Image (cartoon, rainbow, N blue to C red):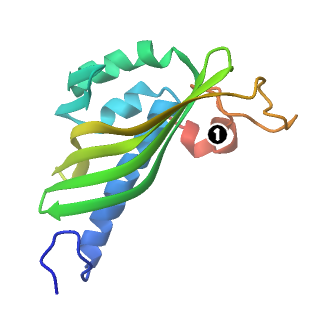
Amino acid sequence: MSDHPLAPRRIDPGEAATREALRHLVAAYGHGIDRRDWALVRSLYHDDGTDDHTPYYSGPAAGYVAWLPGIMANWHATSHTALSALYVIDGDRAEGEIVARAWHLTLDGARQFIAWGRYADRYAQRDGVWRFAHRSFILDHAEDLPAHVGDDFGSAGVGTGRAGRDDPVYARLRLFNSH
């Protein structure tokens, strides 16, 4: 048996619930960024939380969220996806390495930028709720590629993703639209 913090071991129901709460937090971040729901993104960080997207931004989470609308205005659509996640939990604090893909489509739809990397997260549970205490991005690889031009991506009639509240998810999932 290994004492490595990432080695296989028995996970009790309380830890399983914590892991699911952390996975939800990470998934909600991607949704908030892609749908430009800045209030949601801000709610994912503790009030004293920080974010490090060096060299573009590093500092308080409130400043990061205030910075996001300007930088995200450069993209017609984005898709932030968590591919895998490893967590180490220690009481009311935890750390996570989240392997991620962040796809970006230029405003004219001609180019796509894909960042492959990892988030190095620190989480804290306060008043029973897990939030980001600190989130930082590590870039492993980037691609800049031509994109298929046109909103239908070759499939006329298929609902296509949009930044913001006019994304089809809000019409198709009414509970997502209840705030």
Q: Give percent across and percent down for residue 59.
A: 19, 23
**In this rendering, would 112 be left or right of 123?**
right
Residue drawn at (25%, 19%), measured in percent from left and top? 63
Q: Give percent across and percent down for residue 16.
A: 31, 71
**The disc labelled 1 sits on which kind of residue?**
Val
Residue drawn at (64%, 45%), measured in percent from left and top? 173
Q: Give percent across and percent down for residue 88.
A: 20, 62
Q: In which quarter of the image is residue 156?
A: top right
The extreme right residue here reads 156
Look at the picture and state if 87 lies above or below 132.
below
Residue toward you, 143 or 106: 143
Residue drawn at (69%, 43%), measured in percent from left and top? 172
The extreme bottom residue here reads 1
Image quarter where the N terminus lies is: bottom left
Look at the picture and state if 98 lies above or below 139.
below
Look at the picture and state if 57 lies above or below 171.
above
**In this rendering, would 109 be left or right of 142?**
right
| Mark 1 neighbour class, 10 Å CA radius: few under 14, some 14 to 19, many 20 or more | some
Mark 1 falls on what kind of element?
Answer: helix
The residue that label 1 is drawn on is: 169
Residue toward you, 168 or 98: 98
Residue drawn at (40%, 33%), measured in percent from left and top? 40
